[in-house]
Amino acid sequence: MALTTAHEPPARLIDLTRLASRAGRRMTGIDRVERAYLGELLDRQTPLFALMRTPYGYLLLDRSGAQDFCSRLDTCEFGAPDGLARLGRRRPEPVRALESRARERALARCLRSGLGRMLRRSIPAGAAYLNLGHSNLTPRTLGAVRSVQNSRLAVFIHDTIPLDFPQYQREGSVERFRQHLDLAGQADIILTSSDAAAQGISRHLSDPPPIHAAPLGVDLKTPDRSALPGGIETDRPYFVVLGTLEPRKNIGLLLDVWERLGAEPPLLYLVGRRGWNNEEVFARLDAGVPGVTELPDLSDGAVAALLSGARALLFPSEAEGFGLPLAEAAALGTPVVCGDLAICREVLGEVGIYLPTSDPYPWENTVRTLTEQTPPDPPSYAAPTWADHFAVALSVT
């Protein structure tokens, strides 16, 4: 997509509703994107505000409040929920506690009906609003931001997988995503992470606003072998899968492969939590597949250590928005075997080993080869950086 340069706005307003809901949990893809944006905006001089929707209305934070939010999110030092937050005991305590601290630091608060008035009183004219995770992407929110004179709205659409592959989605998620995409179509700018995703957005919106694609940055973590759980073998050939075990990740294909590799196959570590609509795969895992081990809650340092010693990252996914694990593994010098998808080729170029996602036999042959032979040094890979990403994303919003 073409790059057009915009002047730095008089203020930025970032929506932290989704990030607040992840308090106390290990961050995954979209969480990491939102955290990277928050950190970047805190490092800049442009006046910064942050919006949060809670069950009791909206909170508006200034730079100091956003910095406190960020620090608590990183350290998991949330304190105890306040009296108001204790009413919602069904929600996780870290989420209620972080909202409590945000209430204490709020520049302004309002009920739902007062959102527009609060923003007009507190946000400078011409402010730029960023919604990065679809939470709080509602007609009320967009209307309230629009009521601030000369405001600009940017929405990040990570992919169009819910519309392209509805068979892999949770009940109701396709309709919700369609609503979010339609609302994004009312923004001034749509941001995304790849040309492949931008093309998907253009297919599903008849008259979209300008779409700007910028690859996500890769945060390389220092490998920490001491953080690996006891009993994890790394002195014999092993492979890694990284990501939530959801249907589009096509883990069943790899289980087919491992069941054909004989009584003493190489090891396969599935690094990620179980997702949804994948009961058949989970039943196979519960029954046991020789050589296959689930590792759902590794630290970043442990993941980097496991990846750096693997014969390859295996990534038979049938649909991806960007595929951060691809870039992370390649940046560590680990071979990547992945589906022959446009997004995989866009991220990896000549570095990837591309195989069809519907046929287990090429995967079996490749695994055998990588197990039996010492892998050659992979081609050098220049991982995308957040600096490059923000040079695009924050110049057009």
Image: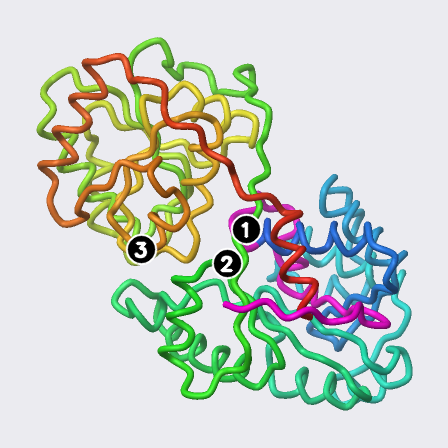
Give the magenta range. Answer: 1-30
In the image, what residue type sits under mark 1?
Leu
- Tell me which residue sits at (91%, 84%) in the image: 121
**Label 3: which residue?**
342
- Magenta residue check for 27: yes
- Magenta residue check for 197: no
| Earlier-in-chain disc, 3 versus 2 | 2
Q: Secondary structure at mark 2?
A: loop
Give yes or no for contact between labels 2 and 1 (Cβ–Cβ under 8 Å). yes
**Label 1: which residue?**
216
In the image, what residue type sits under mark 2?
Ser
Relative height, residue 89 to residue 255 (above, below): below
* Residue 193 numbered tag: 2
| Earlier-in-chain disc, 1 versus 3 | 1
Marks 1/3: CA distance? 16 Å
| Earlier-in-chain disc, 2 versus 1 | 2
Q: Position of residue 69 (x, y in %)?
A: 79, 53
Q: Secondary structure at mark 3?
A: helix
Left or right of 2: which side holds 311?
left
Q: Secondary structure at mark 1?
A: loop
Q: Residues within 10 Å of mark 2 (few under 14, many from 20)?
A: many
Q: Indicate the colouring scheme.
A: rainbow
* Residue 323 numbered tag: none
Q: Position of residue 318 (x, y in %)?
A: 26, 54
- Tell me which residue sits at (36%, 78%) in the image: 203
Q: In the picture, which quadrant includes the C terminus?
A: bottom right
Closest to the observer, 98 or 134: 134
